[in-house]
Image (cartoon, rainbow, N blue to C red):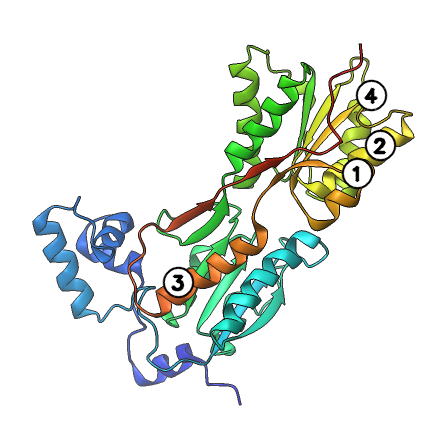
């Protein structure tokens, strides 16, 4: 049976809704970042400011993300932007495994970036009486975050599209290092015309991978050719279209760094249709190290990000929040690693 909406109850009884971090900051005359520092026990806050913020937090009985309902529902919501990718399956595998070990159930909800129909994922999580939410590669608005905080629900984001607040708890991978190592590998083989295909340009992981690619070129003294950079999505079709466009140019690249393994598979097909052989005519590097990479023909050189472990760490971090533990840092990045297989070789003479 659904619980009556809290807002309606508050309007009829006259009770004030639970204040948000921003409300406390406004009343204290400081930034939300300063309030967050006080909550996290940071020492870089003036004593008078700390005392004023602490007094307001106690006066309003503020419930921070690290202090949750005493009674647990034993349920975690996993909200993801799509399940049409092996990438998502690996993430979910890690979340589910960690939750199962702790006797907690998971509910998976799908959202789309252009889907604004109510109820939002935040509303669903409140209706489910969830202990916490793990949000995967999706945006989070200030209103959604405030709704989650008011309900006392824990929140951890995996690969956020952006970081609207520095204290948003998130888990990701060392994307910049991954882009750097992929490009340096191609440079070490003798490639100089190296193209890069990214995902959505606004995503943090895309920006980091392309920045790593650019840094490798700069270190090697190779002038950046912006005409060799493409953006799109992380899917097969996007990789195929971008690669076909690159390979049809008069001075086509001898190597392509793709922002995902699925994009790299699209590059394989574009090369095949162009009559090119991988790696004799075109070297290809992916990103993710999905299980099927080693079974491609040829097996794909790729940057491994520990997807299952990312899911596990996100769930583990969520349970730390639920238990009231203080996090060392709100942002966790797991190490990436280059896996060299047979899709890369020195460029043809």
Instruction: Give the number of the disc on residue 281.
Output: 4
Q: Is residue 339 above or below residue 214?
A: below
Q: Is the residue under label 3 in contact with that under label 2 (CB below 8 Å)?
A: no
Q: How many marks?
A: 4
Looking at the image, can residue 250 be seen?
yes
Q: Is the residue under label 3 in contact with that under label 4 (CB below 8 Å)?
A: no
Q: Is residue 318 left or right of residue 160?
A: left
Q: Secondary structure at mark 1?
A: helix
Farthest residue toward the left? 48
* Foreground label between 2 and 3: 2
Provide residue 319's location: percent of width, then percent of height: 40, 67
Tell me how far mark 4 sits from mark 1, CA to CA: 16 Å
Tell me how far mark 1 sits from mark 2, CA to CA: 6 Å
Instruction: Give the number of the disc on residue 146.
Output: 3
- Give the class, few, some or many, for how many residues have Cα within 10 Å of label 2's Cα (few <14, many ≥20): many
Looking at the image, can residue 120 be seen?
no
* Foreground label between 4 and 2: 4
Tell me how far mark 2 sits from mark 3, CA to CA: 45 Å
Q: Secondary structure at mark 3?
A: helix
* Foreground label between 4 and 3: 4
Point 69% across, 23% down: residue: 195
Q: Is the residue under label 2 in contact with that under label 1 (CB below 8 Å)?
A: yes
Point 57% across, 52% down: residue: 137
Q: Is residue 312 above or below residue 108?
A: above
Lower sequence index among marks 2 and 3: 3
């Amino acid at each position: 049976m659904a619980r009556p909406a809290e807002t309606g109850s508050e309007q009829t009884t006259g009770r004030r809704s639970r204040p948000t971090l921003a409300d406390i900051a406004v009343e204290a005359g400081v930034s939300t970042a300063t309030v967050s520092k006080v909550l996290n026990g940071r020492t870089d806050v003036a004593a008078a400011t700390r005392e004023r913020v602490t007094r307001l937090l106690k006066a309003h009985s503020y419930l921070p993300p690290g202090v949750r309902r005493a009674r647990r529902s034993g349920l975690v919501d996993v909200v993801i932007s799509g399940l049409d990718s092996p990438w998502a399956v690996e993430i979910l595998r890690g979340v589910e495994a960690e939750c199962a070990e702790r006797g907690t159930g998971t509910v998976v909800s799908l959202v789309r970036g252009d889907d604004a129909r109510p109820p939002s994922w935040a509303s669903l999580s409140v209706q489910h009486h969830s202990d916490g939410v793990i949000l995967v590669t999706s945006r989070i608005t200030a209103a959604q975050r405030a709704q989650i905080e008011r309900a006392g629900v824990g929140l951890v984001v995996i690969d956020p599209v952006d970081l609207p607040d520095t204290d948003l708890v998130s888990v990701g991978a060392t994307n910049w290092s991954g882009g750097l190592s992929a490009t340096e590998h191609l440079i070490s083989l003798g490639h100089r015309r190296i193209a890069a295909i990214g995902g959505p340009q606004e995503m943090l992981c895309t920006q980091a991978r392309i920045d790593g690619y650019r840094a490798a070129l700069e270190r090697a003294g190779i002038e950046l050719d912006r005409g060799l950079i493409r953006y799109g999505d992380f899917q097969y079709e996007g990789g195929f279209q971008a690669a076909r466009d690159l390979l049809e140019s008069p001075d086509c690249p001898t190597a392509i760094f793709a922002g995902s393994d699925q994009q790299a598979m699209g590059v394989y097909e574009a090369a095949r249709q162009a009559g090119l052989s991988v790696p004799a005519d075109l070297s290809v590097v992916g990103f993710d190290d999905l299980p099927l990479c080693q079974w491609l023909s040829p097996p794909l050189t790729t940057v491994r990000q520990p997807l299952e472990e990312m899911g596990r760490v996100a769930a583990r971090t969520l349970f730390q929040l639920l238990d009231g533990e203080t996090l060392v840092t709100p942002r966790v990045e797991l190490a990436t690693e280059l896996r060299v297989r047979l899709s890369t070789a020195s460029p043809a003479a």
